[in-house]
Amino acid sequence: NAGVMQNPRHLVRRRGQEARLRCSPMKGHSHVYWYRQLPEEGLKFMVYLQKENIIDESGMPKERFSAEFPKEGPSILRIQQVVRGDSAAYFCASSRDTLYGYTFGSGTRLTVV
Amino acid sequence: KNEVEQSPQNLTAQEGEFITINCSYSVGISALHWLQQHPGGGIVSLFMLSSGKKKHGRLIATINIQEKHSSLHITASHPRDSAVYICAVPSSGNTGKLIFGQGTTLQVKP
């Protein structure tokens, strides 16, 4: 059991490009959460997904950000037309359901230049 | 006022010292999480607890639901314990999403 796999670990994008962050949850986990950690700030919730459904996206910026968790394959967090303020560490966590503990991935560190 | 408050924000200790990190929260919760993050590293879930006390190696976590307070203790601290320790609670609505404290940065000196 490889745990929660996030890739890439580090991603550099120029302003205006698209960033795609991938998260493969632990085997048997159908709940995926994305969190963002801005430099010198704490972790903030972005979006909660189950297979093929967005359950709660109250933490997602209204524009340029989207997330999906398809029936097959990893969950994807997509940021279009990146800006410098998007530079942050993006963490994915998965759980079996809301009553169980979470397993976090190692994060993707996005740098926008 | 933040929903999850940790203290202290920064902590420096000598190797071998007993360490306590505190977490207070204002929302009703089903469970509380303690997480560890090394500089530039990923996040490791240390404990999830809803009552009483849990122990794992040199780490002990306690929670008092009535007082809405939890503590993380590290016995016989070691430089490798240097990390940020984060307390987190589920938000209301049972969606499972977490609200995080601001973290406690611990440095253990040899």
Image: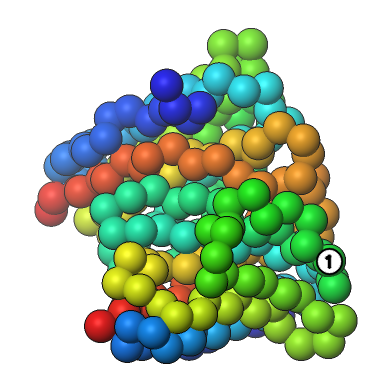
Q: Position of residue B47 (x, y in %)?
A: 58, 45
Q: Residue at x 47, y 60 (%)?
A: A36
Give the camera-side residue of A79 and B92.
A79
Give the camera-side residue of B27 and A68.
A68
B107 with respect to B100 (left or right): left
Specify the amino acid type for callout 1.
Asn
Q: How is the image coloured?
A: rainbow
Q: Residues within 10 Å of mark 1 (few under 14, many from 20)?
A: some
Q: Would residue A9 be visible to someone looking at this image?
A: no
Element at label 1: strand
Give the camera-side residue of B74 and A21.
A21
Give the answer, above or below, for where B110 lies relative to B86: below
Q: Position of residue B18 (x, y in %)?
A: 30, 33
Q: Residue at x 76, y 75 (%)?
A: A69
Q: Classify residue A57 by image quadrant.
A: bottom right
Give the answer, above or below, for where B43 lies relative to B18: below
Give the camera-side residue of A83 and A101.
A83
Q: Position of residue B54 (x, y in %)?
A: 60, 36
Q: Would residue B97 be visible to someone looking at this image?
A: yes
Q: Residue at x 29, y 63 (%)?
A: B39
Q: Residue at x 38, y 69 (%)?
A: A86
Q: State the residue position of label 1.
A: A53
Q: Position of residue A80 (x, y in %)?
A: 51, 80
